[in-house]
Amino acid sequence: MVLINYPPKEIYHSSTQSKPNYDLIILWMVYNNEVCKWSYFSEEPIEIPVGTLSRHLKELKNEGYIDKISRGNYKINSKGKKKYYELSRATKNIRKVNYPPKLILKNGRNYTDWILWMLYNNPYCKKADFLKEPLSINNSSLSKNLKPLIEEGFIIKEKGKYKITGTGKLEYSRILQNYNLDRQTILEEEGKIVEEINKKIVDFFNKFRITDKEIKFQFINYILNFPYEGVNQVLKDEELFYKILLYLTLNHPNRYPNFISIQDFSKKFKIKKSIINYYIDEFSEGKIYQTKFFNLDGPSGGKYYFPTEGKLEKMLQVLTENQINKLAYLNILDSKKLEKILESIDESLIDRLLEEACESIFHKDFKKPLKEFFPEYIKYLAYKISLKPNFMNLYDISDKLEWLIWENMSEAFNLQLSKDLSDQFEEKLREIDNQIEFDPKKFDLYESKIKILIYYNQYNEVLKVLDNMLDVFPEEEINIKMKMASILKKKKDIKGGFQIIEELIQKYPSNNDLLSYKAYWLQYLDRKEEALEIIQKLIDDNPDKGIYYDNYGEIIMYFEEYDKAVKKFLKAIVMCSEEWFIYQSYIKLGICYNVLGNDDLSLKNLKKGKELAEKISTDTDSDNKAKWIAIADLFLSEI
């Protein structure tokens, strides 16, 4: 049985004073149902007279508001939706709540998405609208999801009514991409946002004779990403706001060699130079919006600006991360070469980035300013990447992968905290400390604090936090002390880390994982024979555990004995073809063959490792698995 959505009685119920608005009734029906049959309109409860129905359907069809898709079947189009919104707004006293389609509701309890959908597709919502069917969000979950949306400025609450803001509409547009909606639906939804840009923009273009399509496109893109609501409390003149965005638009690197100086812009657009300077600084440092703007000094004297997360910066990020990760992965599992890796960053990485960036992203004339820009940009990426989750598994295999480079960026470029970053650093720590005080048994909070301290090389503070954690989480002793060993390793005190492992082994002599860690630490100390002796003993005592063959291969791979490592990885693969870690063995085997110059076998094993990694679902460390897939991809692309 087909479930038909009918409008509220107030819409279709006639009275002696007025007739029903048949256009609104029909448009309401075709908007809130996928397809409407003739009978939906002519039968109860609506019961539009046949003649009246025929006339209104014909008029709506001729005016391009609805489409007749087959005999007696009607569907609304994008023009009809606009008309429906107009008629609905005119009917102020009638409120019918629009709810998300089944496709969104069935996609899991994504309450944030549901709330944004509701507030975008309704003039406002009350708390009760979220509590009742079909959403049925309970009070606790509703409050939990409303609070961050209000704090992030996506929604506001006025007199018991929740409404979406301009930035909320942008977030709504983003979440649409997470659902399997057809492209036309997404375009229509995004089109609504574009339509809501005030007529003032058109007047602004006309007033200042802006006709260039590329300038218009970039300007509207900025308007969509930086809504006026974000600054209207301090900048009351909206046209002034448009002028600032126009200045950024006219000085985008894509417009090189064209640019306009602050002096010329000030005269032409009648805006004080001090105002331009102030707000450009505010934008550049991300003080108004989360997005920041980078700037480059052009070779002809102009200053050019481009935003983080914009198309140009995203391309630049992919290029930079690819080069740096490749550098790390080519020195995979080789911690003793860290100094050489950092040297190669200083000597050659920037030059390679410059060549590639000026071939595909920037004009070649930007080569000199980019040479000065890249070290700062890499610091920015290091900060951004360091704040990703699951950063603290530093003593396991992930310590030897992506973070091998990124966590040491501050050392490579002698990173100093700016006042702004220092303030953010202190504020974030205070925030976490407050949360810990409220919930001292939440392990993740301590890890978050440690993550931030590590990025700023506050290793002694990290050790204090870990010491405190031992008192709060005694059951996590091994885990916490291994983190201590990892921090000492970062402080170049590998012997101190090794001592911690020795003490743990004395306390837990039957823990084979600790023996395996001891072998790795002996490896870091260049005590090859002792490291291999421990792994060999683990193999002898546990002949059915192929993972120790994998560990053995990894250690001799560290000492660049790639031919011997191949044999150990092959043994692990033969013994443990179904084990969770085996995809790593294949990828490491592929790397060894790559170094040995056997591209065919390298290609075969890298592909196999990647294929297994994508299929295996028992590996709980999804981030670690993603890193190995990235490693495989880099070597595959190299081949």
Image: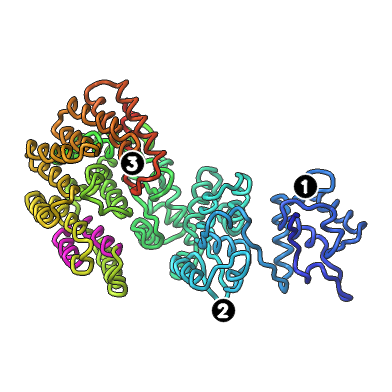
Local secondary structure at mark 1: strand
For marks 1 and 3, the one nearer the N-term is 1
Quadrant that contains the N terminus: bottom right
Q: Which mark is residue 67?
A: 1
Residue identifier under label 3: 580
Which numbered mark, 1 or 3, is in the foreground of this view? 3
User: Residue 488, position in %: x, y?
Assistant: 12, 54
Q: Estimate the spatial distance between the alpha carbons at disc 1 and disc 2, rounded to whole Å.
A: 40 Å
- Observer able to see residue 163: yes
Mark 2, residue position: 159
Q: CA distance from mark 1 to mark 3?
A: 54 Å
**At 38% from the left edge and 37% from the top edge, which residue is drawn?**
361
How far apart are labels 3 and 2 at the CA level?
55 Å
Main secondary-structure element of the magenta-colored stretch: helix
Residue at x 31% of width, y 45% of height:
624
* Residue beneath the point at 87% across and 58% down: 42
SS for dot 3 = loop
Which of marks 2 and 1 precedes in the sequence?
Answer: 1
* Residue 367 can be seen, yes or no: no
Is residue 138 magenta-colored? no
User: Is 525 above or below relative to 191?
Assistant: above
Picture layout, residue 400 above or below residue 586? below
Q: Which residue type does callout 3 highlight? A: Trp
Number of other residues with Cα within 10 Å of mark 2, as a class: few under 14, some 14 to 19, many 20 or more: few
> Which portion, as a residue range, is magenta?
444-469
The image quarter in which residue 431 lies: bottom left
What crowding class fits label 3: few (fewer than 14 Cα within 10 Å), some (14-19), or many (20 or more)?
A: some
Mark 1 touching mark 2, by CB under 8 A? no
Residue type pointed to by label 1: Asp
